[in-house]
Image (spheres, rainbow, N blue to C red):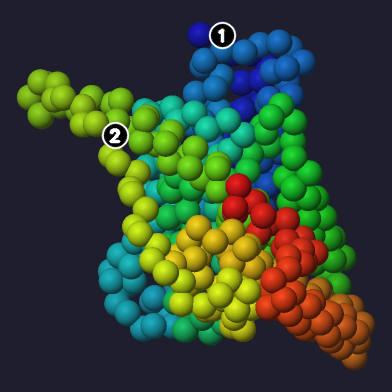
Amino acid sequence: MRLYAKDYVTSGNLLAGFASALFAMNGNLLWAALMMPVAMFFDAFDGIVARVTRRYNKFGGEFDNVADHMSYGVAPAFLLYAAYEPVFREEVGLQRPLAIALAFLVGGVPIFFASLRFARFNTYHYKVPGYWLGVPRPATAFALAAMVNSHLFTAGGTQGRLACILLVLLLGGLNASTFPYLSHHHAGKTPWEVWFYYAVFATTTLLSIALGPVFGLVSNEYIGDTILFSMGCYCFFGWMEVPASARRMAREAVIAGESAEPTTDGRGNVEPVAGAAPTGVAAPTGKAALPSNVAAGISYLLGPLTGVPFLRGAYRDDVFVRFHAWQAIFAVIGVGVAYTGVTILHGMASELWPGFSLLRWVGIPMGVLFVGLWLVMMMSAFRGKKFHGPFVGSQAEKQLA
């Protein structure tokens, strides 16, 4: 069999994943995590080589998929096992066989869900142009690798480390889901939102590596903090960039793809394919208990707690109420994300300049600005008007499309 230049580059991706697993087996969790960006470099570069050399074939695509599975599915499993086996054995105090078994289960989460995703997409070939279905494997792998190297894991104590298992399960489930996420192959070009994600990830990662292992100015855990922050935002909040029409398109593509796959009865006899499951009929909305402007204003009171109820029921078809409910939800998410980012930067700045408080000089003005915008958005709702908050207004409109 003949290999082309692009295939040798793909091998770099595969071997970087193998190196990550080896580092994890030897207890070096930081280098195990840093091998994943190396794998991603080769993963991106093989496509460039293929375009330059004009060598495209089905084998290259399958080989790339297998290499991705190693780097973003298998390697994170080794890393999680290496991180959690000492936790169960030394901190929780379990006998070694039981500690190994529990660490095996935690490590099995990413490889299980990544394998489900691998088999599903190779079988059904969903067609949703411009979107990934489920969080891409590199994002979940980076987030998991960053988690065990972050302050969330290292400084959280035994209870914090055990609580991180919930994050492992959530990321695994998102990886195998069919929820649409904006792709860099969108309408023939990379959207600015994707470039923004890439820029945040690259900038924060390189900065934390330079200040940490290279110059020794801040703790190495900030590498994990910054990568977990950027990847976590994409994994958990990337759906904000997806319009409602794209979610409907994704659901229809999944139903069509999975309904077209024949099944057998175990003896080789093909069974008839079940028809596409109904997408559901909207229940009668009923009569709204409150005027639209009052409902829209109330949706701001407690953010998601008061916003989510107004997305359903009697207000399901009320575009005005739904806009403000979505904007209230996104506003709370946005301020939470902003303060998390500022808190990470505050920690790094405090180690560089002891006594300097970024939370005081940036966090307090951010809070005042948020409260002001919050009051303006809420009062505009009560007055029956649409006020588009910065960023969150456009995101809310997408959910009405």
Nearer to us in this view, 55 or 36: 55
Q: Residue at x 33, y 49 (%)?
A: 281
Residue at 10% in and 29% down: 266
Using a 10 Å C-alpha cutoff, classify the residue at mark 1 as few (fewer than 14 neighbours), some (14 to 19) or many (20 or more): few
Q: How many marks?
A: 2
Residue 138 — which label? none
Query: 12 or 397: nearer the eye?
Result: 397
Disc on res. 2: 1
Percent across and percent down for residue 192 are 78, 44
* Residue, disc 2: 276
| Residue found at the very far left of the displayed protein | 267
Lower position in the chain sequence, tag 1 or tag 2: 1
Question: Marks 1 and 2, Cα distance to the nearest angstrom?
Answer: 43 Å
Q: Position of residue 268 (x, y in %)?
A: 11, 21
Q: Secondary structure at mark 2?
A: loop
Q: Nearer the viewer, mark 1 or mark 2?
A: 2
Residue 7 pos. (x, y %): 61, 21
Residue at left 78%, top 55%?
200
Q: Position of residue 190 (x, y in %)?
A: 74, 36
- Asked if 349 appears above or below 45 in the picture, the reply is below
Q: Residue placed at 82% from the left, 55% from the top?
A: 203
Determine the secondary structure under disc 1. Answer: loop
Seen from the viewer's position, the closer of residues 290 and 209 is 290
